[in-house]
Image (cartoon, helix red, strand yellow):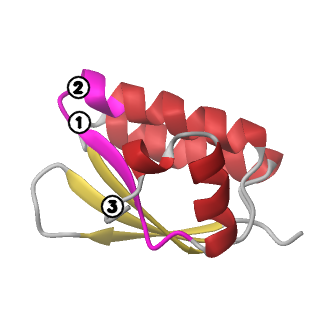
């Protein structure tokens, strides 16, 4: 599988970033995502939006990390959310019960 690419976009809102993700969130992709998101949370950018329209696969470790980063952002008064999930990802989020917690617009 190709590597995960992460493009950060400044939303213009304080403490908020949009991350456009492309590629799989497998074991390596989870590590890349963790490194990126943890850096933002450590610097109090705690409102994180993940555009997952170009992510066709999320492993169980990726799901666990999404939950952990959602909790970390919430602990600092922020939120982590997913927008435009690829149908494969949306399905996984629904069957794990996370769609209502993570996905903007259901």
**Viewer-proximal residue among 68 and 11:** 68
From the viewer's perspective, is 15 left or right of 103? left
Give the residues drawn in magenta, as a range. 73-85
Q: Quadrant of residue 96?
A: top right
Residue at 71%, 71% in the rendered image? 56
Q: CB of mark 2 within 8 Å of CB of mark 1?
A: yes
Look at 10% across and 61% down and name the residue there: 13
Residue 35: name its quadrant: top right
Left or right for 3, reference 9: right
Q: In the rendering, at what x and y percent does residue 27 appear?
A: 81, 45
Q: CA distance from mark 1 to mark 3?
A: 21 Å
Q: Earlier in the sequence, mark 3 or mark 2?
A: 2
- What residue lies at 36% left-to-right and 44% top-to-bottom? 40
Residue 29 percent location from the top left of the image: 72, 53
Q: Which residue is mark 3?
A: 104
- Magenta span contains residue 6: no
Residue to which mark 2 is pinned: 76
Could you tell me which secondary element the residue under label 3 belongs to? loop
Give the number of the disc on residue 44. Answer: 1
Name the front one of labels 1 and 3. Answer: 3
């Amino acid at each position: 599988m190709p590597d995960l690419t992460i493009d950060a976009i400044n939303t213009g809102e304080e403490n908020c970033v949009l991350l456009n993700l492309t590629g799989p969130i497998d074991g390596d992709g989870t590590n890349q995502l963790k490194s990126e998101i943890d850096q933002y949370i450590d610097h109090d950018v705690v409102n994180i939006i993940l555009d997952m329209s170009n992510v066709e696969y999320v492993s169980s470790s990726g799901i666990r990390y999404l939950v952990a980063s959602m909790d970390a952002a919430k602990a600092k008064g922020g939120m982590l959310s997913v927008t435009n999930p690829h149908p494969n990802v949306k399905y996984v989020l629904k069957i794990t019960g996370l769609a209502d917690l993570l996905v903007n617009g259901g």
